[in-house]
Image (cartoon, helix red, strand yellow):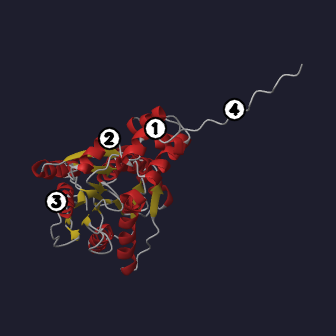
Amino acid sequence: MTQRAAPKSKPKTVPASRGSRATGRVTIIDVAAEAGVSPMTVSRALKTPALVQELSRHRIFAAIDKLGYVPNQAAATLASARSLVVAVLVPSLTNTVFIETLAGIRDYLAGAGYQFLIGETGYDRAKEEQLIATYLAHAPAGFLLSSSEQHEILQSRPSSRDIPAVRMFDLGRSHHDLSVGFSQTRAGYAVARHLVERGYRRPAFLAAQLDPRMMKRREGFRKGLQEAGIDPDVEVLLPLPTTVDMGAQLLRRVLEQHPSCDSVFCCNDDLALGALFECQRQGISVPREMAIAGFNDLSWAACATPSITTVVTPRYDIGYKSAEMLVQQLKGEEIAKGRLDLGFELAVREST
């Protein structure tokens, strides 16, 4: 007696969810099917992305972007045509520069009736992409971004087409590219011209982190030195986070490589303070034997001994004006200047 073979089972598929059939709206089940993961994994990726494996995260966010998935809470906001949440991306939540900018954003948005989500990127492009994808899934009213790279990432996402964004700290190429900040290049140039006018002939550029804004300061500094016929290649650059101790290390290194160096432009005040401490340790007179200039004018720069010459940047105003410009865009109001240059000042003090 022969036995009849059992019929082969068909591979399991995840059907379209009842909600998507009934309403036409993409659901978390649709995203899970597209990404090849469970709905629970999708939910976890949106709420706590660090708990989901990197490969799965990439598939999930790609599926979200492809399908245009919007979580229920955000969908309700869209239905009422009133999203009142702004997504803000900054490199650091411990750096005074960005804390003051966030204070400006907070003060304007609170008065305008908006809330904001803060994403810390750590100068990491992969994290920027992850945060932008996550925030897009929650359908924010708009974005406030802290770099041109973040702006490029946002623009590359199909689901961001109708979401306005303002770039902070640097300036866009035109008034159509909404931006609020100042020229990092001109600021670096101003420091170079100041040192040249003070009679220094062997200036060096000291930098860490090496983000695009930092490199624009370097570009302007080099241009200022070249115009004065001075070698712009006396510099030490390290792709590491900036600290006060790093400033001391950079000064030691430049003096080892270029003993005749008579002045330094540090890409931020933390490095400048470290350079000042190292001069004091080595018995180098500031500014007679070594001039020191910093950047950002942090609160203690004027209190150091000697006080530190530095570039004063409008950090609070950048946040406030960027939030104002974004809300104007959201309300369809006319924006007088889509490329708002707030300028900078050179605070000349005892260290130069």
Say which of 83 and 272 sits in front. 83
Q: Position of residue 330 (x, y in %)?
A: 20, 60
Residue found farthest to the top: 1
Dot 2 falls on a residue whose secondary structure is: helix
Amino acid type indicated by mark 4: Ser
* Mark toward the start of the polypeptide (4 vs 2): 4
Q: Is residue 259 visible?
A: no
The residue that label 2 is drawn on is 72
Cα gap from disc 4 to disc 1, whole angstroms? 28 Å
Cα gap from disc 2 to disc 3, whole angstroms? 28 Å
Q: Position of residue 21 (x, y in %)?
A: 42, 45
Q: Residues within 10 Å of mark 4 (few under 14, many from 20)?
A: few
Dot 4 falls on a residue whose secondary structure is: loop
Q: Is residue 62 above or below residue 181?
A: above
Q: Nearer the viewer, mark 1 or mark 3?
A: 1
The residue that label 4 is drawn on is 9
Q: Nearer the viewer, mark 3 or mark 4?
A: 4
* Mark toward the start of the polypeptide (1 vs 2): 1
The residue that label 3 is drawn on is 324
Q: Position of residue 180 (x, y in %)?
A: 24, 64
Residue 92's label in the rendered image is none
* Mark toward the start of the polypeptide (2 vs 3): 2
Amino acid type indicated by mark 2: Asn
In which quadrant is the C terminus drawn? bottom left
* Mark toward the start of the polypeptide (4 vs 1): 4
Q: Nearer the viewer, mark 4 or mark 1?
A: 4
Amino acid type indicated by mark 1: Val
Residue 42's label in the rendered image is 1
Q: Residues within 10 Å of mark 3 (few under 14, many from 20)?
A: some
Q: Is residue 271 visible?
A: yes
Cα gap from disc 1 to disc 3, whole angstroms? 34 Å
Q: Nearer the viewer, mark 4 or mark 2?
A: 4
